[in-house]
Amino acid sequence: MDHFKQWEIILIDDEEDIREVLSIVLEDAGYSVTTASDGDSGIKLCDDIQPQIIITDIRMPGMDGIQVLEAVKKDYPDIEVIVVTAFGEMELAVKALQLGASDFVTKPIDEDVLMVSIKRAQQRYTSRKKLQDYTRFLEREIKNQASILHQDKMMSLGRLSASVVHEINNPLFGILNYIKLMIKIIGRGQLKEESIQKFGQYLDLVEKETQRCSDIVSNLLTFSRKSEPSFEQLDISDLFKKCILLSQHKLELCNIDLISKIEPDIPAVRGDSNQLQQCLINLIFNSIDAMPNGGTLNLSCVYDSKDNHVLIIVQDTGCGIKDKDIAHIFEPFFTTKEEGYGVGLGLSTVYGIIEHHNGRVNVASKPGNTSFKMYLPIEAK
């Protein structure tokens, strides 16, 4: 019970003799005691003394003990209150306990009984404080996890943006050339039938390439948006399309062949689209990093009707993960990459997100064949 260096007690009683005797007893027991002759004065002391425990008589002129208890629990709910009653006032004692009193003692006060009541009040107070501290700790942890999740997303976004700039540049260059060509043809004078047909073909290509740019930017903006988790029914094929659209150009630049296969009639899963997209993007980027000289990336999805879950598999032909590292890859800030190429948040983020979806993720690896498997229950939430 040494949670505090000094336990502060306010003793409220209208009888001076009782105040003096109890003060001596409590101070001899190691407590710091401040006395008040009435309820109003005792409550006013709370701001200055900041006691952990108040001992108050029930029968007092003016504000009685029950009113003191009610006022304390309203304005200082953490303070423990012990009420002192006369023998035979059990109804008042029961009422005090119902209003939140820690305990009651009867007059004449037995020192041993009083000490037991104070120890009980200390235990209640300390337990409550520990619970409050732990609650605050959990709240901070939740905020930290949200921060890590967003930080990881921003790092993925940076890598995606660099790739998307190159991907958008190509169709924009083509669009610009078609427009210049059409302006040149128009400058020659009246359009011939042959030129009109070419214009139709050019405009069709411009529309398709512009739509592709729009889709890429739209997906990038959706991915980058900081939003509260929102669980809804998700089509896995749509999830694959979005991730492939954002990463395909990077795969091509790295000479990596992409094979995507989704079983027909895969049931929808309940989850957060943005978070699951972040998982898949992270695993795709990990595979890209593992294949610096090119290779093959397989994305597949199957439905296990026996266990009623959807299985998403990301498999690559990269360098693999060392046996000594396998047990640590989902730990925050663990990374096997060189300094400046990663801070070890990606896989821990994947693990946290899938766990939040009531799923699980595991990995099997050897040189030339590494596969990550994400299991998502059909009814996750």
Image: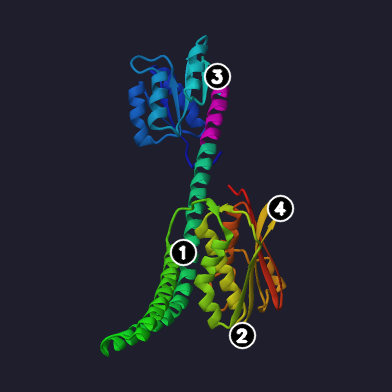
Q: Which amino acid does label 3 sit on?
A: Asp
Viewer-closest of 238 and 108: 238
Q: Which of marks 4 and 2 is in front?
A: 4
What's the CA distance linking mark 4 and mark 2? Answer: 38 Å
On-image quarter of the N terminus: top right
Q: What residue type is labelled 4?
A: Ser
Relative to 79, is 294 above or below?
A: below
Q: Which amino acid does label 1 sit on?
A: Phe
Q: What residue type is labelled 2?
A: Asn
What's the CA distance linking mark 4 and mark 1? Answer: 31 Å
Viewer-closest of 254 and 118: 254
Q: Compare marks 3 and 4 and give the one earlier in the sequence.
A: 3
Q: Compare marks 4 and 1 and give the one earlier in the sequence.
A: 1
Q: Estimate the x, y position of residue 264 in percent, counting from the top left.
A: 65, 60
Magenta residues (range): 112-125
Q: How many neighbours does mark 1 have within 10 angstroms: few (below 14), some (14-19), or many (20 or more)?
A: many
Disc sitting over residue 110 in the figure = 3
Identified at 40% across, 36% down, the residue is: 50
Q: Mark 1 points at which residue?
A: 223
- Colour logic: rainbow
Q: Compare marks 2 and 3 and give the one earlier in the sequence.
A: 3
Identified at 58% across, 47% down, the residue is: 381
Q: Mark 4 points at which residue?
A: 305
What's the CA distance linking mark 2 and mark 1? Answer: 28 Å
Regarding mark 2 in the picture, which secondary structure is present there?
Answer: loop
Q: Mark 2 points at which residue?
A: 293
Viewer-closest of 222 and 3: 222
What's the CA distance linking mark 1 and mark 3? Answer: 69 Å
Q: Compare marks 4 and 2 and give the one earlier in the sequence.
A: 2
Marks 4,1: beta carbons within 8 A: no
